[in-house]
Image (spheres, rainbow, N blue to C red):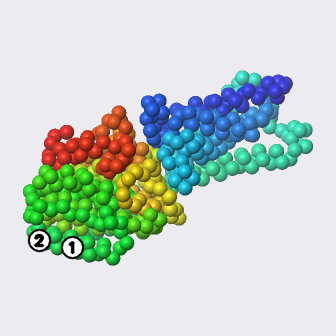
Amino acid sequence: MIPVARYFHWTLVAGLLFALAALALAPFIGLDLRGAFERRPGGVSWPALFVGVFVCGWLFWWLLIPGWQKVSLRAGAAAGILTGAFSYPVVIGMTELSGRTGDTSLHGGWDRVMWITGLSLMTTGFAAVLGMAAVGLAGAWALSAIAPSAVVPDTETAAETARPLWRRLRWLAAGAALVVASGLTASFAMLSTTPVSVEGLVARPSPTTPVATHQEAVAAFAVVRMAEAGLALHERCPSQLLTHGYKTAVAVVFFHGLTSCPAQGEELARAVFELGYNVYLPRMFGHGEADPDTLALAGLTAEHLVDLANESTDLAQGLGDKVIVAGLSAGGTIAAWIAQNRTDVDHAIPVSPFLGPYIIPPWATRGATNLVLGLPDMIFWTNPLAPVTAPDSGYAFPRPSTHTLAQVMRLGQAVMMDAALTPPAVRDISLLLNEADIAVNNRVTEQLVDLWRAHDQVVAVRALEFSNHLPHDLINPHEIFGDTDLVYALLAGMIGGEEP
């Protein structure tokens, strides 16, 4: 029989095998490792993935298969399952410590680590553990083939009989592996096959009626400001209206992003206003409060976003003969909903719409939405869609919650489901995407574009190249790595009808 000491290096080989398999599986579970090789931000770095999986793989292989006497296909599969599951928090935590996910402060980083870990594990985790189980099976089979005479039935040795705690720990780990694999697979099957609850969003009546004249639009805006006067808003965060004093040929509505406020689009609005357009910057529900610790966003629902879409579109009818709507991130989701549902809008321009988070692949987006909607709400200390807050922005970034994100995703699911059945209501649709974005999943947006084009709808898509290294917030001029000269020029051209 081969001495145990000669076996130890095979545990290291097993860890290496798991690490290499993780690199191969990464694209299927939503990790973009191209960024690591191209110095591209986002997701996790390949060194963190490799090292984290290697350590977990070696540890669980050593625990379940410490010697030749314990080599079995069952133990190999169990080691793979546990490696796949426990690698999530280890790898994401290592990535956070390396600073690749943005803010590494305790309050700003670790709640995000827990959320990303839970969301990823409960959605794509089943694919990871099953893939690693197959790798573990292959590894155990290979060991049996290498030294079949050293592999004996899994019977208790004298050493293990004297150490019942060790034996129980191995059995506990094997049982946990079975529970983890079956639990993750069953939960994903349930979450992904259950339709997201979007009843009533499409048919939801507008709380206002479309106005016809500029005077009526100004009066409607006064009603909006009167309602906001009762809120403790930051001085720059009430809804804003830039008007030439008459109904222009074109009116533009811009919807700000999650946790921001109308101040985000002030500079863009001025640039568009100088082109001769009236511009309206509405405020989302729960946004713009002066108290930075407010929990107002926890009450945001997809219904609030639909009401804002309808109210703003109704008001804009009196501001221009043609109405163009645009929006960033969650505001882009609102613009996408308008594109699908409002026939009185001439052009919709979603900018990096938030239809799903970057960390979740398109095939798991429905499951992720159902999961986050079903779990208890959790408050973030920072915006997980923009973990690095722009300095000198001058306005508050209220703390969102998991349900806040899920409600925006719910609206996105409503758009996707409706687009699969009916053509969009808006004649002209243009999208501006950012290849360096690490907040929203552009692949989900591309699926929406495909659904619209399947109805013979012409959809123009412009993508800001990764080489620009632009942040998620393309609109705020205070973003450190932003380039609003480039972005504003592109948007002005899209608003003016320039061909991509």
Which residue has dot 2 on it?
A: 215
Of 1 and 342, nearer the camera is 342
Q: Does label 2 or label 1 sit earlier along the sequence? A: 2
Figure label count = 2
Of 311 and 391, nearer the camera is 391
Residue 124, horizontal then vertical, whole percent: 51, 46
* Horizontal relation, residue 198 to residue 127: left or right: left
Q: Label 2: few (<14), some or many (≥20) within 10 Å?
A: some
Rendered position, 143 above or below 200:
above
Rendered position, 408 above or below 200:
above
Q: Amino acid at mark 1?
A: Ala
Give the SS element for disc 2: helix
At x 48%, y 46%, the residue is 102
Which residue has dot 1 on it?
A: 222
Residue 241, horizontal then vertical, whole percent: 20, 63
* Horizontal relation, residue 277 to residue 298: left or right: left
At x 44%, y 49%, the residue is 388
The image quadrant where one finds the N terminus is top right
